[in-house]
Amino acid sequence: MNHQIQMAKIVSIAKLAGKAILNIYHDAEFSQVVDFKSDNSPLTLADRAAHDVIVDQLDKTYPDIPIISEEGAEIPYEKR
């Protein structure tokens, strides 16, 4: 697998995720924990929003590259 990664696109995705986080922080309920992970660490609305933006944009830009993330589901080794 040889994929060309476009740094400008990656930076753009990171900025979109940052905007999603800021939208939640500007909301009165930003600090609300929505869930706990298996290690008992908190998962906030901002975590989920950033994750959703990043995964959505990466999947649209690089559909053939599997995404492994802290907030995402486990991907079987064969698909990595």
Image: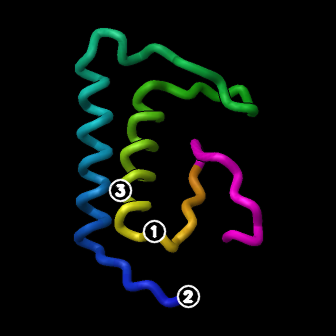
Camera-side mark, 3 or 1 = 1
Q: Give the CA distance from mark 2 to mark 1.
A: 13 Å
Q: Secondary structure at mark 3?
A: helix
Q: Give the CA distance from mark 3 to mark 2.
A: 20 Å
Residue 32: where, in percent of width, then height?
46, 14
Instruction: Read off the residue under disc 2.
Output: 1
What secondary structure is the magenta-colored segment mainly? loop
**Mark 3 crowdedness (10 Å alpha carbons): few <14, some 14-19, many ≥20:** some
Extreme residue toward the bottom, this view: 2
Q: Earlier in the sequence, mark 2 or mark 1?
A: 2
12 vs 7: above or below: above
Q: Would residue 8 be found to the left or right of residue 61 on screen?
A: left
Instruction: Read off the residue under disc 3.
Output: 57
Image-quadrant location for residue 9: bottom left
64 vs 60: above or below: below
Report if residue 73 lies within the magenta region. yes
Q: Secondary structure at mark 1?
A: loop
- State the scheme by which the image is colored: rainbow
Residue 12: where, in percent of width, then height?
23, 59
Q: Earlier in the sequence, mark 3 or mark 2?
A: 2
The amino acid marked with disc number 1 is Pro
Q: Secondary structure at mark 2?
A: loop
Count of numbered circles in the view: 3
Q: Would residue 15 be found to the left or right of residue 52 on screen?
A: left
Q: Quadrant of the N terminus?
A: bottom right
Q: Would residue 3 be found to the left or right of residue 6 on screen?
A: right
Q: Which residues are magenta?
A: 70-80
